[in-house]
Image (tube, rainbow, N blue to C red):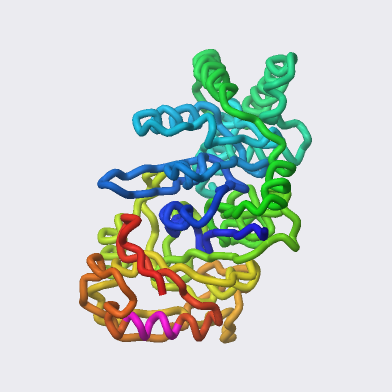
Amino acid sequence: MAVDLLLGLQWGDEGKGKIVDVLTTDYDIIARFQGGPNAGHTLEFDGIKHVLHTIPSGIFHKNALNIVGNGVVIDPVIFKKELDALKKFNLDIKSKLFISRKAHLILPTHRLLDAASEASKGKAKIGSTLKGIGPTYMDKTGRNGMRIGDLEMSDWKEKYRNLANKHEAMIAYYNVDIQYDLAELEKDFFESIAELKQLSFIDSEEYLYQAQKSGKKILAEGAQGSLLDIDFGTYPFVTSSNTTAAGACTGLGVAPNQIGDVKGIFKAYTTRVGSGPFPTELFDEDGETMARVGNEFGATTGRPRRCGWLDLVALKYAVIINGVTELMMMKADVLSGFDTLKICTAYNYKGEKIEHLPFNIEAENVTPVYSEMKGWKEDLTKMSSADQLPASLQDYIDFLEKELEVPIKIVSVGPDRTQTIHR
C-alpha cells in the first residue's frame, strides 16, 4: 500500500489538523514526519477545541495508530503536557501512540540557546518560536544530538550532561542577557522523560514497512508549510526541517516510489506568522477583517497572523515542488462579505512580470500583480454540500483549479469537523 501525504502549501497554519482528523477514518496509521512543538494542529468537534503540538492528529480516533517519526524533534516537557491534556478523554494512549527511536530530543538548553541566538540578532531576528527547534536540528546535523533511543541506554544522563554543558558554553558566547535556572528546568525535563519512557519506542521505518506489506493504509502528516521549508522556503525566514513532500521520505523512512496521493492544504487567502517577506500582505481594513473573522492567532504561540490575498504564484510553486495530486481549500467562510476578491497571479520582479517564485521575494524586489473576482455575501458555515455553495465561490474555485491544474476536493467552511464539504 502506498503512503499518502498531507501537508501545508503556504507558511503554515493552513488547517492540517482538522483535515487529518476528517480523513483519519480512511487510514490505519497517522505518522508525523518532521517539525516539533512549534507546530500547532487545531481540531474541533463535539463543541471542544483541541490543540496538538507533537502528537499526530489521528489520536482521537479509536481505530488509528499514531506514530511520531524519526524526522520529528520532541520536547518531553511539552509532550507530557499534551499527554496530560488528553487524559480526561479516556484514550488508550499506550496502545495508540508510538515514537521512533531515531527522533531527536529537545533539551532545556536547546530552548535557552534559541532565545540567546534570537536575542543576539536584534532587528535581524528570524521570528523563532523559541521552542528550541533550530538548535536541536543543528545538533542533529552536527552529529551531537540525543535521540529517543538513547533513553534506553544506561549512560543517557551522562550524554545529556555533556551536551548541556556544551550548550551553556555557547549561551555564554552569545553574550546576551538570558536569565535562567537550569536546575529547575531540568527537574521538569527529567520528570517528563520518565513519563515519555512509559510509551512504546519503535524502529519506525521497519514498523511502517511491515505495515505497508500487510496492507495498512498510512497517512503522513506534515507540520508548518511548504514556504517554511529549509531548502525551498523563504530562507532564512524558515523552519529547520523539510516541510515538503520529500521530508516524508527522510522523516519516516518511506521510499520515494511508495508515495501515493499528495494532499495539499491551503487557505482561501494567505497568512504568515513571524518575520519574513509576504508579497500580498494587507495593512488595511480588508486585512484586519480577515484576521478578525478568521481568528488568526497562532495555535502554539498565540501570535497574530499577518493576512493577505491569495498568492497564486507561491501556491503554484508549492504544488509543483510537492507533486500535489489533490487540494483542500480552508477557511472559505472567512471571505464571505467581501465585494471584490483579489488573487495574485504574477509578480512584478525588478521591473519584469514573472509567474514563478524567484530567489528573493522581499518587498523591494517584488510587487504583486492582481486579478479581481466578484465576492460572495452568503454565510457558508451551515452549508453541507457543494451544490449549496454560491456561484461566486464556485467561480473562485474553478479559477484556482484551472490555474493550478489540480482538483480541489475539499472546501472547509468552518472549524468543526462537520463543516467540511467534499467535492
Which residue is drawn at the image coordinates 51% and 45% (left, top)?
64
Viewed as shown, does residue 330 lie left or right of 355? left
Q: In which quadrant of the rendered view does residue 138 lie? A: top right
Main structural element of the magenta stretch: helix, strand or loop? helix
Closer-to-camera residue (252/306): 252
Closer-to-camera residue (269/397): 397
Q: Residue 118: x percent and y percent?
A: 55, 40
The image quadrant where one finds the N terminus is bottom right
Q: Residue 159: x percent and y percent?
A: 73, 20
Is 397 contained in the magenta span?
yes
Label count reads 0
Viewed as shown, does residue 293 lie left or right of 297? left
Furthest residue toward front: 214
Viewed as shown, does residue 211 lie left or right of 372? right
Is 199 contained in the magenta span?
no
Q: Residue 356: x percent and y percent?
A: 60, 78
Which residue is drawn at the image coordinates 29% and 85% (left, top)?
391
Which residue is drawn at the image coordinates 52% and 40% (left, top)?
54
Q: Magenta span covers which residues?
A: 393-399
Q: In which quadrant of the rendered view does residue 166 lie? A: top right
Residue 297 showing in the rendered view: yes
Viewed as shown, does residue 75 lie left or right of 17? right
Which residue is drawn at the image coordinates 71% and 54% (left, top)?
249
